[in-house]
Amino acid sequence: MILATHTSRVSSFLPTIATASRTANRAAHRSIYQKTVFNSVEGAQTAKLHDEAKEPQEEPVPSEPMPPRLMRKGTDLEATSGTLNQIAASLDLYSSHLTSRKFPTTSLQRIQTLNTSRKSLQGSRDENLGAAKKLSGEIGKIMKSGGDASAVEEIKAKVEAAKGTAEKFSSELGEVEAELSELISALPNLLDDSVPTGPDESQNEVISSWGSPSSLPAKLNWSPTFTPKWHDDVALSLSGWLSPSAVKMSGSRFASLSSSCASLERALSNFFLDELSKSGYTEVSVPSIVGSPALTNTGQLPKFEEDLFKIHDFECNGDAAYLIPTAEVPITNLHSSETFKSEDLPKRYAGLTDCYRKEAGSYGRDSRGLIRLHQFKKVEMVTICHPDSGEDEHQKMVNTAEGLLQKLEIPYRKVLLCSGDTGFSAQKCYDLEAYLPSTDSYREISSISSTGDFQSQRAGIKFKEGKKKGFCYTLNGSGLAVGRALVAVLENYQMEDGRVKVPEVLKGYMGGKEYLE
């Protein structure tokens, strides 16, 4: 049964996500490059990182040990995010997953109580409707046989009474269902069993790394005394940094580029789309404005409304309108309320859009440069697939994003997020973090999530396999975040004389240029 209102259109009871921006600069990390090169020259001063680029570092606070999480394997929830009845019947499992996410569990008991009331009200309503139907049949028999008219009137009164009682129960049922819909739409997804337990990003697991930051000085002919510049300083030296003008027009956390920097941004976008097309992702162009049901389907609403830009004098099909925070929203919703034949899956898409986020809760963090903006470009990958191929498609998406960084020759690492850092809609998420020499740190450049059937239950995206029907799995990931890729190229290809070497794979997109200058 679907408990959904017209405005929310929550198409099933199960947990949800939202891909909110994650604090980068994961763990304090001392660069191999700085230790092996800057400090190896006798008499040279120890290189210092750009003061404005570095964020204040707080002393780490020891985390309280988290209780073990109940595993999904072998339960009814092994391959699904759960229906209303499954949630009510599996409170211990759900509670352990919410606790592992540092998410309040108070709503679970209320959900169980309301679900009991829902079943009781449904039964009472149906009982009275059934009685009214049966009595109506008796009226016909009496009238057909020429029976007593007073008996007919008496039965009609009983019919109306039963219908009135049924209507009363139906009204109460509607109120219960509305509250249940609100509570369940605010529950996050269950976690995959392979997700490590941990309270925050400090417990994320580095799975692998690629590239060598220590090779940058030799590769770019940096002298022992050269300190890598912050990306906006690099762009400024190329006459490509117009952000003061953007701030004058739009306020903080907006940026403008010109000249070779704008061309590099376009080159990266086209390169990503071309490569994703070769990897089997169909390019799509989608709206940048969507209605609230689309955001509810993918999990941004209701929990993350404060981070969205709402359009107050415009509606989408009668619903509240918002600027998209990520192309994941419109691309996933291309197939809302559709049923696929299993042989027609998977569906893989890639799209370039501007993304809009208020960055609520990020005051004072990453206020300089292109790292955290209200408006930014991103190429997004979305896959809709059969549940049996969900894990394979997740790995394919991760490998595809890694291939982009490898072709750009940007050092990076792959990180499996722990329970406390995994996004709301995700059951499992990998981050790819690019190395930035200016701050001697790794910063997120792609976040690649499997949501299981969490989003598809909300959006009504199903598959049919013979007589079997079920909900598809959905996956999404950056391929890549264009602005952060631009940051990585400017920093990892900067020359000491102010020029920027063009990555080999981008030369064809930059008119054959060897350098930006």
Image (spheres, helix red, strand yellow):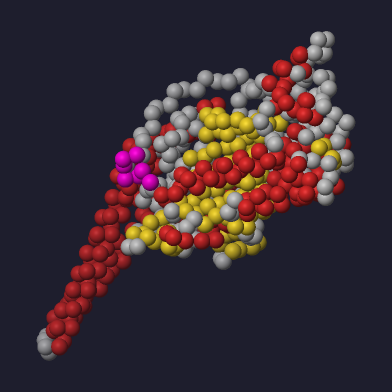
For image coordinates 18% across by 75% down, the residue present is 135
Q: Does 82 appear above or below 191? A: below
**Residue sitting at x 73%, y 47%:** 268
- Image: magenta residue range: 73-79
Can residue 258 be seen here? no
In this view, the residue in front, 111 or 422, is: 422
**Horizontal arrangement in the rendering, residue 485 relative to residue 225 (left or right):** left
Residue at left offset 71%, top offset 17%: 35
Instruction: Choose between 402 and 189: the one closer to the eye.
Output: 402
| Location of residue 349 by image quarter | bottom right
The quarter in which the C terminus is drawn is: top right
Residue located 11% across and 88% down the image:
145
Percent from the top left, x then y, of residue 422? 51, 37
| Residue closest to the eye, 485 or 242 | 485
- Where residue 131 sits in the image (x, y, percent)? 20, 69
Up-down: is 517 above or below 124?
A: above
Number of disc labels = 0
Magenta span contains residue 486: no
Residue 47 placed where, x, y %?
Answer: 78, 19
Quadrant of res 351: bottom right
**Up-down relation of residue 312 to residue 206 (above or below):** below
- Please indicate whether residue 484 sits to the left or right of residue 281 in the image: right
Q: Is residue 357 left or right of residue 201?
A: right
Q: Quadrant of the N terminus?
A: bottom left
Q: Residue furthest top?
A: 43
Residue in front for this viewpoint, 171 or 43? 43
Q: Residue 341 appears at what percent x and percent y?
A: 43, 62
Considering the whole magenta stretch, tell me its main secondary structure: loop
Q: Is residue 146 visible?
A: yes
